[in-house]
Amino acid sequence: MSDTQSGQADISAMQADDFFGNYLDSIVKEMGLDTLSDEDKSAFKEKIALLVHKRFINTLMIYLPEDKAREIGSKADQMAPDELINYLMENVPSAPEKIAEELKSLKDELIGDMRK
């Protein structure tokens, strides 16, 4: 991989991390939990991050074309999380759009549940 490609991958990873951090912060704020201690906010964000990760993978698995699903087969359980996500992002048509929709849906669900 060239330095340019490596640099682009690093930038994309940093942008994704920034986006995800901002996403979690906005959930905390919109749920009115920004007054929690830093420790409690961090614990809450970790739980939400796990939930998001599961939804992220499940959403992409639903849209994975059959031939790619057969290709990955039972290997998915042995893949590192980042490796699985990269595979899904590369092989699911319109993956970024599907993820954006799912993140919005999850956020709406969480905030809606909190307000009930």
Image (cartoon, grey):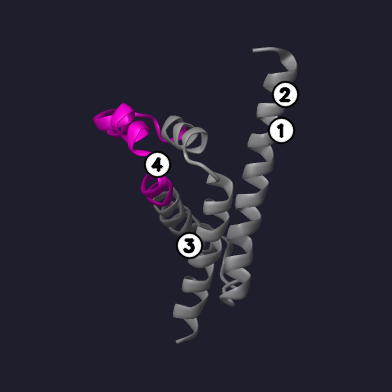
Q: Give the answer, above or below, for where 6 lies relative to 46.
A: above
Amino acid at dot 1: Ile
- Residues in magenta, as a range: 57-82
Amino acid at dot 4: Leu
Q: Residue at x 50, y 66 (%)?
A: 105
Amino acid at dot 3: Phe
- The answer to whether mark 3 and mark 1 are in CB contact below 8 A is no
As helix, strand or loop, the secondary structure at mark 3 comes to helix
Query: In the rendered image, which residue does mark 4 sit on?
Result: 64
Query: In the rendered image, which residue does mark 2 sit on?
Result: 7
Which of marks 2 and 3 precedes in the sequence? 2
From mark 3 to mark 1, how far is it between C-alphas?
A: 27 Å
Q: Tag on residue 93?
A: none
Of the 4 image quadrants, the one containing the N terminus is: top right
Between 8 and 43, the one nearer to me in the picture: 8
Q: Give the answer, above or below, for where 50 lies relative to 1.
A: below
Between 73 and 68, the one nearer to me in the picture: 68
Query: In the rendered image, which residue does mark 1 sit on?
Result: 11
Looking at this view, name the residue that lies furthest to the left: 74
From mark 2 to mark 1, how far is it between C-alphas?
A: 6 Å
Query: Which label lies toward us, 4 or 3?
Result: 4
Looking at this view, name the residue that lies furthest to the bottom: 116
- Residue 36's x, y, as percent? 56, 71
Q: Local crowd at mark 2 within 10 Å, few (<14), some, or many (≥20)? A: few
Which of marks 1 and 3 precedes in the sequence? 1
Query: In the rendered image, which residue does mark 3 sit on?
Result: 44
* Left or right: 53, with 71 as reference point: right
- The answer to whether mark 4 and mark 1 are in CB contact below 8 A is no
As helix, strand or loop, the secondary structure at mark 2 comes to helix
Residue 43 is one of the magenta-drawn residues: no
